[in-house]
Image: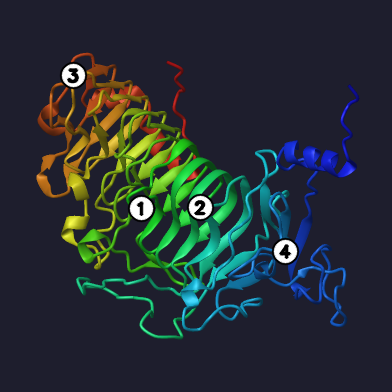
Amino acid sequence: MPMPTVTLLALIQTLVLFAPMGAGAEANTWHVRTDGGSAVECSGRVDAPYSGTGANQDCAWAHPFIALPPGGPARIAGGDTLHIGPGDYMMGLGAPATEACSSDFPWECHMAVIPSGPALDQPTRILGAGHDSGCDSAPVLWGTERSWMVINLEGSSQVKLACLEITDRGSCIEAHCHNQLCAGEVVACQRDEPPFGTWAPTGISARDSDHVLLQDLNIHGMANRGIFAGRLSDWTLERVVIRANGWAGWDGDIGPDSANRGTMLFRQVDISFNGCAERWPQGDIFACWAQGGGGYGDGLGTGITGGHWIFEDSRVRYNTSDGIDLLYLTDGGRVTIERTRVEGNAGNQVKVSRASRISNSVITGSCGFFSAHRNMHGSDHCRGLGDAVYVGLSDGAQTTLINNVITGQGNCLVSSGESDRQSHLLLADNLMIGSDYWHDPSKQACLFHASSRRGTVVWQANVIDRVRHRQCPAGSRCGAKAVLDDGRLELFGLLDQGQLPLRQTTD
């Protein structure tokens, strides 16, 4: 029997149908610079200024909105690279390429969704000037007129953002002291009627987003949250600053379904002074507030979530509520904190649960740090009793605290909630030093308190001093002489130099 004839058209259709996604797709590179032109004037393909005359010239675009216009569609495709030159770019109503925006709804005037890369090795890249040479001249993307977000990752996957400064110029906090419970300076943003001013609530908004790399970003001074993100998987943050955002640094509670999965890696990240305003352009911190005044203040907090959250070589400090709040982990959730400094947060420094390990880190529970800030209420200082480390021991949690320096002025240095018989907490080779309890200076901080004693708590070779009732579990070395002999007190003099001279552990 003769073979059937296959037409050329049918063959092409078959090849297209079974070709892998992204195969053969050409990735383009686009350029933005402050002296570029419009989409009509410039192709966006060449890193050159607009000459001032003509159309479709070989030159850069003048603004990121030309590549990712409010209301879309994007002019770049998944897997493309967008280079943004040095300088300032206003992000919101009144910026270039915002013709589709309405002055009646200026909060909707924000960047289009960044297209997802077609594959893990073909991410869409938004790169600021100097991304490959130290990031000394990062472009500034600043939100204005209450634009909901500066960067839009809602539904974006396989994306890399590098070398960008993300901020606003409002020197205000959205709905600051809205219950009129503050005694100090009130700096509420104008949101009753336009013009709203040079502020925006959110630096990066993300949901349903996988395999994202944030690298060399400075997210600061936003009126509400630095990063508002949930339903994520496999995100990495490297050399990212999240500082002085008026409600929270990283808020992972985007609604009832906010759970994350995969690996959430924070490496060389600084999360600080969230819950405070930042005065533009000086950068002064002021008007700090927290839950007593109707605010929030976590450095990083989530709702119910999964995933393996890893913090390496990072700092989480001086936030107006908890530093790291990962108490609401579900089955399979894990926390690893390594070579990290957590201090001066007004609530608990660290909250963990499930399978968690904190090692080679410094946790300084100076939870009364904000006592001189008049907008902070008495209940905000050492909130949740100010325990430096809180461990959730239910559901068979297996938690290890090993080779850390833990100090605090909260009720206890370490505390745990309800536990079950399968839960296990190991504290080994830590230097643990108490001080006067903030809410009752007649008492010192206790060493450890457990709401339930059904789990197993094991103490091994810890060095302990200045704790309530001189608690000294068997196998510990206790008292001032033991601390001095331990040799790690020099650590406190080295912290401001960014050094962590703790011996490493491998067990």
Q: Nearer the viewer, mark 3 or mark 1?
A: 3
Q: Which label's residue is closer to the chain start, 4 or 3?
A: 4
Residue for badge 4: 85
The three-letter amino acid code for the residue at tag 4 is Gly
Q: Are marks 2 and 3 in contact (CB under 8 Å)?
A: no
Residue for badge 1: 318
Measured Cα–Cα span from mark 2 to mark 3: 40 Å
Q: Nearer the viewer, residue 345 or 432?
A: 345
Helix or strand or loop: what does disc 3 sit on? loop
Residue for badge 2: 241
Q: Nearer the viewer, mark 1 or mark 2?
A: 2
Measured Cα–Cα span from mark 2 to mark 4: 20 Å
Q: Which label's residue is closer to the chain start, 2 or 4?
A: 4
As drawn, is 370 to the left or to the right of 451?
right
Whether residue 312 is visible: no
Measured Cα–Cα span from mark 1 to mark 4: 33 Å
What x and y, as percent, mark residue 435? 20, 40
Instruction: Locate the N terminus by quadrant.
Output: top right
Residue in the image at 49% along x and 78% along y: 106
Q: Which label's residue is closer to the chain start, 3 or 1?
A: 1
> Is residue 11 shown above or below 398?
below
Measured Cα–Cα span from mark 3 to mark 1: 36 Å
Residue for badge 3: 421
Where residue 446 sits, quadrant-wise, is: top left
Measured Cα–Cα span from mark 4 to mark 3: 58 Å
What x and y, as percent, mark residue 428? 31, 20
As drawn, is 441 to the left or to the right of 159?
left
Q: Residues within 10 Å of mark 1 (few under 14, many from 20)?
A: many
Q: Are marks 3 and 1 in contact (CB under 8 Å)?
A: no
The three-letter amino acid code for the residue at tag 1 is Tyr
Where residue 77 sits, quadrant-wise, is: bottom right
